[in-house]
Image (tube, rainbow, N blue to C red):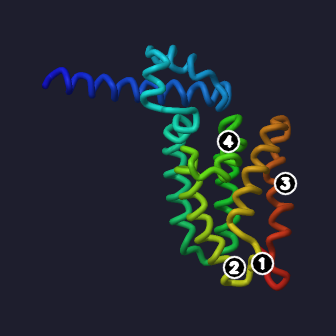
Amino acid sequence: MTDTRTKRADARRNYDRLLTEARAAFAERGTDASLEEIARSAGVGIGTLYRHFPNRHAMMNAVFQESLAALLERSRELAGAEQPCTALVEWLRALITHAGEYRGLARALLSASHDRNSALSACSVPLRDAGERLLSRAQETGSVRADVSIDDLMQLTNAIALAAEQDPKDPELADRLLTLTLRGLRSENRPC
């Protein structure tokens, strides 16, 4: 029985080391960082990495759970805001910031949005649902056009983050692109 507990503890330590090394590698080299290097840095073999994370998206999903939780919490805080359109805009900005934190994340989230079988859908589906609630409230007040969908907004936020990633020398690019996008969201009757 002691061997089983030791293996479980060892497996947990391996998992934690892999996550720590993946976070560091993704931050330094982007989400395309070598999985072999991550395993080596964690002091485990590639087989151990794949036992814990069957593919890159599964590893990315695990790495981004903390950020996901923060974004979901922020959406809950904003859900009762007095100005639903302002709340939606604030949340979209937070989403763009998140997608831009790691080089390659925006591209991966864009591809995962079309693939419900992707391990990253565990990130994108709750974000989509949270955004849907904020969008619906803004639409109910007439601030946002009725024909705007959350899928459109998710694609746009990822595209904005991807564009900003391609031009890191312009730190204001994402905000400018979001501002342009928001002009198209507004209802003719009520601005955001």
Whichever of callouts 4 and 3 sits on the residue coming sooner in the sequence is 4
Is the residue under label 2 in contact with that under label 1 (CB below 8 Å)? yes
Callout 4 amino acid: Ala
Spatial distance from mark 4 to mark 1, Cα to Cα?
28 Å
Q: Are marks 4 and 3 in contact (CB under 8 Å)?
A: no
Q: Quadrant of residue 147?
A: bottom right
Give the x, y percent position of residue 79: 55, 71
Q: CA distance from mark 3 to mark 2?
A: 23 Å
Upstream in sequence: badge 1 or badge 3: 1
The answer to whether 118 is drawn above or below residue 1 in the figure is: below
Q: In the image, what residue type sits under mark 2?
A: Gln
Q: Nearer the viewer, residue 98 or 12?
A: 12
For the N terminus, the image quarter is top left
Q: Residue at x 52, y 50 (%)?
A: 122
Q: Earlier in the sequence, mark 4 or mark 1?
A: 4
Q: Secondary structure at mark 1?
A: loop
Which residue is labeled 4 in the image?
Answer: 108
**In the rendered image of this protein, does residue 153 appear above or below residue 49?**
below
Which numbered dot is residue 139? 2
Is residue 164 shown left or right of residue 127? Answer: right
- Residue 3, image x, y percentages: 18, 20
Decide which of 152, 192 is in the foreground and name it: 152
